[in-house]
């Protein structure tokens, strides 16, 4: 009788643990899916102007950032510019302006 009860408790505990792990897996997968959707939405918005708005934003803050003691690019602008460079959707004029000002060095560029 004790062995049967112990077996039932072990099976129930294993089932509960499996159920919790599966729920956690589903949450991680949903978070990945939402991140992918968000990235594609951002790409679509960036493609509209060839990332020119983000380049202009970065150029407008360059003097202020350098005076503050270093060039720390705000994470949202940096993330979008890297996305533009990775996907090859940056306009020719935007890329030329970043190369002229040497801001392109702040980003990993895969040519």
Image (spheres, grey):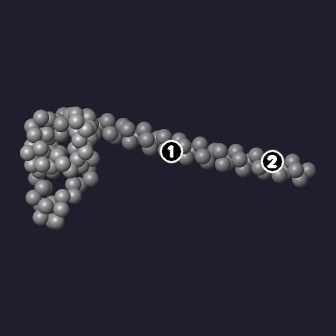
Answer left or right for 49 relative to 41.
Answer: left
Find residue 64 and report its image quarter: bottom left
Query: Is 6 on the left or on the right of 53, as rendered?
Result: right
Residue at 8 percent across and 45 percent down: it is: 100
Left or right of 77, for residue 26: right
* 102, 59: nearer the viewer: 102
The percent position of residue 80, horizontal first and vertical second, equals 25, 44
Q: Position of residue 48 (x, y in %)?
A: 18, 34
**How packed is label 2: few (under 14 Cα within 10 Å), some, or many (20 or more)?**
few
Q: Quadrant of residue 22?
A: top right
Q: Secondary structure at mark 2?
A: helix
Residue at 34 percent across and 40 percent down: it is 38
Q: Nearer the viewer, residue 58 or 44?
A: 58
Outermost front residue: 111
SS class of the residue under badge 1? helix
* Residue on which the image places disc 1: 27
Q: Nearer the viewer, residue 54 or 83?
A: 83
Residue 41 in the image, given as x and y percentages of width and height = 30, 37
Marks 1/2: CA–CA distance: 29 Å
Q: How many marks?
A: 2
- The residue tagged 2 is 8
Q: Position of residue 60 (x, y in %)?
A: 10, 53
């Amino acid at each position: 009788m004790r062995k049967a009860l112990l077996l039932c408790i072990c099976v129930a505990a294993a089932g509960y643990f499996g159920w919790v792990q599966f729920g956690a897996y589903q949450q991680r997968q949903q978070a990945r899916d939402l991140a992918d959707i968000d990235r594609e939405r951002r790409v679509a918005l960036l493609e509209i102007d060839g990332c020119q708005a983000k380049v202009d934003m970065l150029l407008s803050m360059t003097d202020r950032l350098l005076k503050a003691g270093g060039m720390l690019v705000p994470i949202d602008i940096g993330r979008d510019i890297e996305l533009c460079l990775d996907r090859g959707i940056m306009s020719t004029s935007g890329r030329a302006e970043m190369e002229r000002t040497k801001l392109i060095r702040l980003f990993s560029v895969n040519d």
